Amino acid sequence: MAQKIIIEPFHDGQVIRVTLNAPKANVLDGEMMTDIQEFLDVLPNQDDVKLVQFIGAGDNFCFGASVPEHTKEKAPEMLKHFHQLFYTLADLAIPTAAIVSGQCLGGGLELALMCNFMFVDKSAKLGQPEIMLGVFAPPASLILPMKIGQARADEMLLTGKIISAEEAVQIGLATRLFDDKESMLAEVDKWVEKQILTKSAASLKCAVKAARLEFNSVIKNKLQKQEELYINELMATHDANEGIQSFLDRRKPEWKNR
């Protein structure tokens, strides 16, 4: 069985690339989340790391978290592990970058949103389609308003709108746009050499803490409330469970508005 993530060091270990390795969807299931968490847990011992990159194997970044793990019985454990990734990334304060091609949806986009930088190529499609399944996206509900403003965040979160790479750059969600994945990797590497490797790793960590003081405070203090809303209120409704089940059954959901 292939490894769910691939860890590759670059630039003498100053840059570490994490590849979500379950193409074509690169779904963030429990096994992949555990592997990412184990990787993040050892980073505090690596003083020279200046940037962590996340990328998807193949043509897509990530279709999102595993829908079968969103059922009422499994959601509490899934959310606990998923949200721990965000707490850990906040505490690490190591600069992070998402390198996005193809579909970047749901939990995949939430992981990319948590990064300091998001690079996209023209194939990228980004969105939070959870509402289509009768549920919502806890981390994105906090992060999107901070990054692109409440009005644009509401549109993405409440309609499930999928945006293009061009729009992502236009609204300030993505850092830079490239023609394709190959050119993106080459140009991002040049950007890293110029903008990241010339800095002190220790100073970068302090700068991340300073730049994200308010951002991280929101994550640490309010993500748990989002999790409780999801588990205790949302999953107590008929429609949230119907939405997940209809997806698993590959049929249209039958909403009862309760």
Image: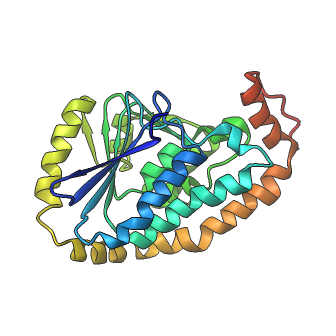
Q: Residue furthest front?
A: 1
* Residue pictured at 65% horizontal, 60% vertical: 80
From the viewer's side, name the closer residue of 254 and 192.
192
Which of the colour schemes (rainbow, by chain, secondary structure, one colour) is used? rainbow
Closer to the camera, 84 or 111? Answer: 84
Q: Nearer the viewer, residue 152 or 238?
A: 238
Residue 18 appears anywhere in the view = yes
Image spot of residue 99 (x, y percent): 32, 43
Q: Position of residue 162 (x, y in %)?
A: 51, 34
Q: x, y (%) of residue 129? A: 60, 38
Question: Residue drawn 71% across and 44% down?
Answer: 70
Visible residue check, residue 149: no
Residue in view at x 84 percent, y 33 percent: 255
Q: Is residue 250 above or below residue 194?
A: above
Q: How many marks?
A: 0
- Please say if 129 is above or below 154: above
Where residue 216 appears, as percent x and y from the top left, is: 47, 71
On the picture, is 182 further left or further right than 132? left
Q: Nearer the viewer, residue 255 or 1?
A: 1
- In the rendered image, which quarter is residue 226 located in? bottom right
